[in-house]
Image (tube, rainbow, N blue to C red):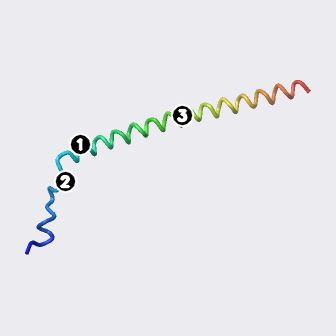
Amino acid sequence: MISRSHTLHPNTLPPSQPIANQDQNQNLIQDQIQIQIQIQRATALSTYCTQLVLKIQHTVRLMY
C-alpha cells in the first residue's frame, strides 16, 4: 500500500511552471503600468475640465 505522502512528491510541478509564473508576473506588471497611465490621464482630464468650468463661470459672471 502506498502512503499519501509518498504519492505527493515535492517535484510534481512541471519545469515550465516557473516560466509561466514569470510571464504572468510580467503581464500583471504591464497591466499595472497601463492602469497607472490611465489614472494619470483621467486625473489630467479631470483637472482640465475643472479649470475649463471655472473659466466659463468667470466669463459668465463678467457678462452679467
Q: Which residue is mark 1?
A: 19
Q: Is residue 63 left or right of residue 13?
A: right
Could you tell me if the residues under marks 1 and 2 are in contact, i.e. CB atoms within 8 Å? no
Mark 1 belongs to which amino acid?
Answer: Ile
Residue 63, picture quadrant: top right
Q: Earlier in the sequence, mark 1 or mark 2?
A: 2
Element class at badge 3: helix
Q: Position of residue 48 (x, y in %)?
A: 66, 29
Could you tell me if the residues under marks 3 and 1 are in contact, i.e. CB atoms within 8 Å? no
Q: CA distance from mark 2 to mark 3?
A: 40 Å
Q: Quick one: which residue is furthest to the front in this view?
A: 1
Circle 1 crowding by C-alpha within 10 Å: few under 14, some 14–19, many from 20: few
Q: Position of residue 9 (x, y in %)?
A: 13, 61
Q: Which residue is mark 3?
A: 40
Mark 2 belongs to which amino acid?
Answer: Leu
Element class at badge 1: helix
Q: Is residue 14 left or right of residue 29?
A: left
Q: CA distance from mark 1 to mark 2?
A: 12 Å
Determine the residue positioned at 14% across, 69% down: 5
Q: CA distance from mark 3 to mark 1?
A: 32 Å
Q: Is residue 32 above or below residue 9?
A: above
Could you tell me which quadrant the C terminus lies in? Answer: top right
Q: Which residue is mark 2?
A: 13
Mark 3 belongs to which amino acid?
Answer: Gln
The label on residue 35 is none
Q: Position of residue 35 (x, y in %)?
A: 48, 38
